[in-house]
Amino acid sequence: MASAEQPLRADARRNRDRILVAARDAFAEAGFAVPLDDIAARAGVGPGTVYRHFPTKEALFQAVITARVTDLVTAARQHADAPDPGAAFFAFLTHLGAEGATKRDTSDAMTVPGPLLADLHDAVATLLARAQDAGAVRPGVTVDDLLTFLKSLFTAVHDGPDPGRAERLFTVLIDGLRPPQAPPAATP
Amino acid sequence: MASAEQPLRADARRNRDRILVAARDAFAEAGFAVPLDDIAARAGVGPGTVYRHFPTKEALFQAVITARVTDLVTAARQHADAPDPGAAFFAFLTHLGAEGATKRDTSDAMTVPGPLLADLHDAVATLLARAQDAGAVRPGVTVDDLLTFLKSLFTAVHDGPDPGRAERLFTVLIDGLRPPQAPPAATP
Amino acid sequence: MASAEQPLRADARRNRDRILVAARDAFAEAGFAVPLDDIAARAGVGPGTVYRHFPTKEALFQAVITARVTDLVTAARQHADAPDPGAAFFAFLTHLGAEGATKRDTSDAMTVPGPLLADLHDAVATLLARAQDAGAVRPGVTVDDLLTFLKSLFTAVHDGPDPGRAERLFTVLIDGLRPPQAPPAATP
Amino acid sequence: MASAEQPLRADARRNRDRILVAARDAFAEAGFAVPLDDIAARAGVGPGTVYRHFPTKEALFQAVITARVTDLVTAARQHADAPDPGAAFFAFLTHLGAEGATKRDTSDAMTVPGPLLADLHDAVATLLARAQDAGAVRPGVTVDDLLTFLKSLFTAVHDGPDPGRAERLFTVLIDGLRPPQAPPAATP
DNA sequence: CATGAATGAGGCTTCATTCAT
DNA sequence: AATGAATGAAGCCTCATTCAT
C-alpha cells in the first residue's frame, strides 16, 4: 500500500521548493499583489508550473505561510509545559520575537486564515490565560491583541535596517504587557 | 502663460475639493487598490476630471496623504507647547492613536516621502526627546522605532474588526514606553 | 425627467452597433468559442470597449440574438390573429422559414435562454395548439420539437451553398407536420 | 526504420484501444472541448501516452469519428440488400436516428472529411435513389439535403434533455419524406 | 515505451490613462 | 473645463503540446 502522500518526482519536488522560496521572497517584498507570473519567473518556471502545484495564487500564499505557522504552533505547545505560567508565556514570546526578527514572513503567518491559524490561536490562548491567571500579564489583553501587536512589530522591524529596533520594541511590548504597577507610594 | 499659482475657478475649486474628499474616503475604506473610476463616481465627476486636477492616481493618493500628514504635524507642534513633557508626549500619542484607529490611511500618511514627513519626524522627535529627558519615557527608543511601529500597528488594527483593540494595544504601548520600574527593592 | 433609457453618445452608439455587428458575424462563423479579442478587432475597437458595453462575453452573445428573437415573437403574435388556425400556423412557419433562410443567426436566436425565448415559446405554443386543435397539425409534436427542428433546418441550410435546399427541407417539414393520412382505402 | 505497418506491442495496442474508448466517451459527453488530460485520465494513461498514439488532439478526434463513420457505412450497405427499396431506406434512417439520439458525436461523424465520408455519401445515395425510384420517397430531396439536415438535427437534439424528442422529430421527418399525397379528390 | 511535469501561448477581464465630444 | 467613452497593457488562469525521468 502506497502512502497517501506519495513523494513527488525529483524534478517536481525541486520546482515546488523553488516556487515556494520565490513566492516567499516575492510576497515579502511586494505583498500579495505581486504578479504570479513574476513569482514563476523568479522560480525559473512557467506560470503553468505554478498552477500544477498550487491551484490558485491564494493557495500558494497559504502554502508559503503554512510551514511557518506550523512551527509557531509547535513552539507554543512546547512552552505550555513550563511550570511557571508567566515564565512560560514570556519565554514563548521571546521565541516568537526571535523568529519574527529573523524571518520576514512571520507576520504574514500570523494573519492567514485557516485551521492552522486557529491552532496557533488556541495554543497561545492557553499560555496567555494561564499567565494572566497567575497575575503575570495584565488582564484585558486578548490573544488577537497580542498577535496583532506582534505582527505589527515584525512588520516594523523589517521596514527599516536598524538592527537594534527589534529588541527595543520588544522590550516595550513585554513591559507593556506586565500588570500595571501601582504608582510608587510616597514613603515618608 | 498663466501664473503658476492662479486661483482656480470656483467650480474647479469645488470639484477639486470633492475629489479629495471622495479619494480620502475611498482610500480609507478600500486602500490604494480602489479603482479611480469609483473615486470619480463618489465625487460625482467623470474620471477625466480627476485627471485634470491630479496627473496620476498616485499623485491623488499623495495629495490625500499630504493633508493628513499636515494635520499630524500641526497636532504634534501644538502638543509641544504643553508644560509637562511627559504629558505632552503621551497626549500626542493618544491623539495619533485615535487618528489611526479611525482613518485607514493614517499608516500610509506616515510613509509618504518628502519634506512633510521630515517635519512630522522632527516634531515628534522634539516631543520624545523632552519626555525622555524628563524621565517620562524610557530611553533608547527612537522616533523611527515609534513611527515605524505605529505605522504597521495602524495597518494591523484596520485588518481586524475589533474596535476595542486599538485602545487596548495603545495602553500596552504606552505602559511599555514608560521607564522601567526598579524591581521592588528587597526591604530588610 | 430624463427617460430611463437615455440615448448613448453618438460615438458610443456607433461603437455599440459595430460591436454587435461584428459579434453577430463572428459568432455565426466560429461559434461562441470565438475570442472576444477577435470580435473587438473586427469591430475596430479595443477589448475594453466591448466590456464597456457588455459586462461579459456571454452578455454580448445574448445581446446579439435578443434583437432577432424580438422580431420572431412579434411575427408570431401577428399571425395569431388570423382566422384559420391551420393557415395561421403555417403562415408563421413560412415566415420563420424565410427569416431563417436569410439570416444566419436565426438558429442561435431560437436557442438562447432567457425571458425573451420564453415569449417566443409561448407565442408559438399558442399558434401550434390552435392548429393542432383544428386538426391541421399532427398531435404530439411540441413547441420545443418544432423549434428544434427549425433550428436544425436553418443550420443545415447555412452549412452548404445549395440555394434550393431550404425550400426542399422546408417542404419536408411542412408535410411531416400535417396529420398522418389514413392509408388510401383500397376501393373495390 | 521499422515497417510502417508493424503490429503494435500488446500493451501498446491495449493502450491505444483504451484511449479510443475513453476519447469516444469523453467527446460524446463533453464535445471536442473536453481537455485532453481528462481523456488520458479516463483511459488510465498519461497525456504523453496519448501523444504517442495520436499526433494531435484533432487526430484523436478524427480517429474516434472514423470508427463511427465506418459503422454507419456498414449499416447503410447492409440495408441496401433489403428487397423493398422504401423499407430499406426508412430502416436505415431509423437506425441512423437511433445512433444519433444515443451518441453525441454522430453529427461530427457526418462531417469528417475524407474518403470515408464519400463512402457514406454513396451508400446513402444508393438507398435514397432506389427509394425514390420506387416512389417511396418524394423526389427532389438529395443526399446532401438529408445528411446535412440530420447532422444538425442530432446536434440540436443533444442540446435538449427531452429523450422523446428525437423519436417525434424522426416521425415528422419520415412522414415529410414520403411522397406528397394527392389532395383528397372531390368526390361527386 | 509510459509517465506526468513543464511549458507558454492565449483566453477573459480590469482599470489607469487618454481623447473625442 | 467637464464628461465619459475608448484604449490597451497586464493580471489570473487553462490546456495543447513537449520533454525529462
Image (cartoon, coloured by chain):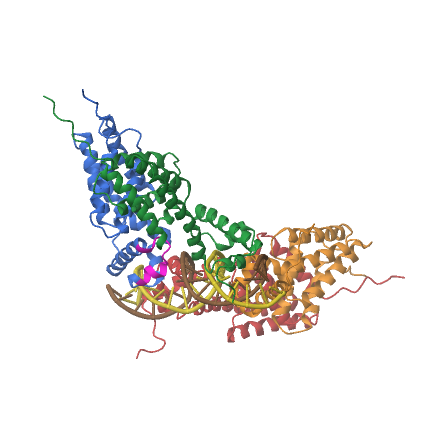
Chain colours: A orange, B red, C blue, D green, E brown, F yellow
Is residue C8 shown left or right of residue A82? left
Q: Which residues are magenta?
A: C29-41
Is there any visible trace of residue C25 in the rendered image?
yes
Is C31 colored magenta in this rendering?
Answer: yes
Q: Is residue C84 above or below residue B34?
A: above
Q: Is residue B17 above or below residue C140?
A: below
Q: Is residue C141 above or below residue F20?
A: above
The image quarter containing residue C13 is bottom left
Which residue is at the far right? Answer: B188
Is D102 colored magenta in this rendering?
Answer: no
Is residue A102 shown left or right of residue C72? right
**Which percent across, then down, holds residue C130?**
24, 29
The image quarter containing residue A100 is bottom right
The image quarter containing residue B63 is bottom left
Magenta part, dominant SS: helix
Q: C166 or A105: nearer the eye?
A: C166
Is there any visible trace of residue C109 in the rendered image?
no
Q: C13 or C94: nearer the eye?
A: C94
**Which percent across, then down, holds residue D74?**
39, 44
Q: D38 or B78: nearer the eye?
A: D38
Q: D83 or B109: nearer the eye?
A: D83
> Which quadrant holds the C terminus of chain A?
bottom right
Q: Is residue C31 above or below residue A99?
A: above
Residue at x-position 33% and y-position 34%: D168
Residue at x-position 60% and y-position 62%: B153
Which residue is at the far left? Answer: D188
**Which percent across, then down, holds residue A161?**
63, 74
**Which percent across, then down, holds residue B47?**
36, 63
